[in-house]
Image: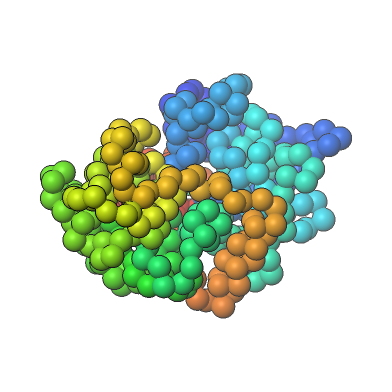
Amino acid sequence: MKAAVLHEVGGVPRFEDFPDPVPGPDEVLIDVKAVAVENVDKLIAAGTHYASKKYLAQLPAIPAFDGIGTLPDGTVVGFGNPRPPYGALAEKTVVAKGAYAPIADGIDPAVATVLGTAITGMSLTTAAGFVPGETVLIQGATGVAGRLAVKVARLLGAGRIVATGRDEGQLREVQALGADTVITTAVPDAELAQAFTDAKGDGYDVVLDYLWGRPTEILLRSLVPESFAFPKPTRLIQVGESAGGTLTVAAESLRTSGVEIYGAAKGLGPDTMGQVYGQVVTWAQSGELTFDVTRVPLSDIETAWQRTDLRGTRLVVVL
Ligand SMILES: NC(=O)c1ccc[n+]([C@@H]2O[C@H](COP(=O)([O-])OP(=O)(O)OC[C@H]3O[C@@H](n4cnc5c(N)ncnc54)[C@H](OP(=O)(O)O)[C@@H]3O)[C@@H](O)[C@H]2O)c1
């Protein structure tokens, strides 16, 4: 079969022949249809992600750990966790029986690869217990996940949406998607802290954080009140780390600001996952939620893997 083949940790996958996977008794062969290439796939291939050890235990290997494909009976499914060295970026892959779920009728496989990213926006409800009318701050709103989160927050009935990014032009696009106020993080620390304070109104109820690192460190600092006061709770949901994997939290930020920090996995279980997935699919089918994807063939993987021009749109390899 043809596959994207990674020969070394930190290398770039190449379009090559690779032996077909042979499923064991508890496995099933997947005929791959579409695979999103995300930051996490690049981190794993670079050897800098906690899952790198598992997926790169044997080289050469095929990157990407999930995608959309068909089972031998033709059912279209979203699958995950291929058996290394097989990955999703190939004509065929192999997963454990049950490591897949059917994709709803009428959803294009390329769009289906982005449903999981939209579901991070649904952590507004699953992790933060969002109620309509609340003020939401989305950190990293110019990215694929952030833009979807702005749309999801609007669909869920956010009272006010504040969105951050580094680029004025892209922030205008985010405003067109539904953000009420935008903040650029590409300014000195004191200016950014002031912008967070100016935009918060009577307080951020929920923060969806795709950045972490410097912008979130400054945000947390900006939430410290200037006098003794009863704090208004701010539920900060940690979803991504585009701006850094660590930050320093001043003791007074936690002590005084009312901030509560949760991971996006909070509240997720088989039932809630089914509910939020169903909601995202309903919006996708009705056209209320749209997904921006850039399609490339598998044969272009070497060039596509290295693209840096794609902002706010998901690179999807279609087979
Ligand atoms: N937990 C999950 O299930 C899940 C799912 C999807 C994504 N994520 C995570 O969420 C994050 C965003 O994913 P994505 O797919 O939206 O990525 P993306 O499309 O590449 O967007 C990245 C965002 O981060 C901003 N950014 C990048 N580096 C930055 C820096 N040094 N300082 C400030 N802003 C910076 C980008 O701004 P520009 O537009 O200016 O470049 C953009 O807004 C990633 O960490 C990803 O792993 C998590």
- Determine whether, in the image, residue 218 is placed left or right of residue 177: left
In the picture, residue 17 is in which quadrant?
top right
Position of residue 117 relative to residue 28, above or below, is below
Please state which of residues 185 and 37 is positioned toward the viewer in this rendering. Answer: 185
Where does the image place residue 213, in percent across and percent down from the top left? 31, 38
Instruction: Tell me where residue 180 appears, x and y as whole percent.
Output: 29, 70
Query: Depth check: 111 or 260 in front?
Result: 260
Residue at the image position 27 percent from the left and 53 percent from the top: 229
Is residue 249 at least partly visible in the picture? yes
Q: Is residue 93 above or below residue 193?
A: above
- The percent coordinates of residue 224 (x first, y second) are 25, 47
Which residue is nearer to you in this view: 246 or 205? 205
Question: Considering only vertical position in the picture, is 56 above or below 210?
Answer: above
Locate residue 97 relative to residue 252 in the image: left or right.
right
- Locate residue 303 relative to residue 17 in the image: left or right: left
Quadrant, the N terminus: top right
Across and down, in percent, residue 89 comes to 58, 42
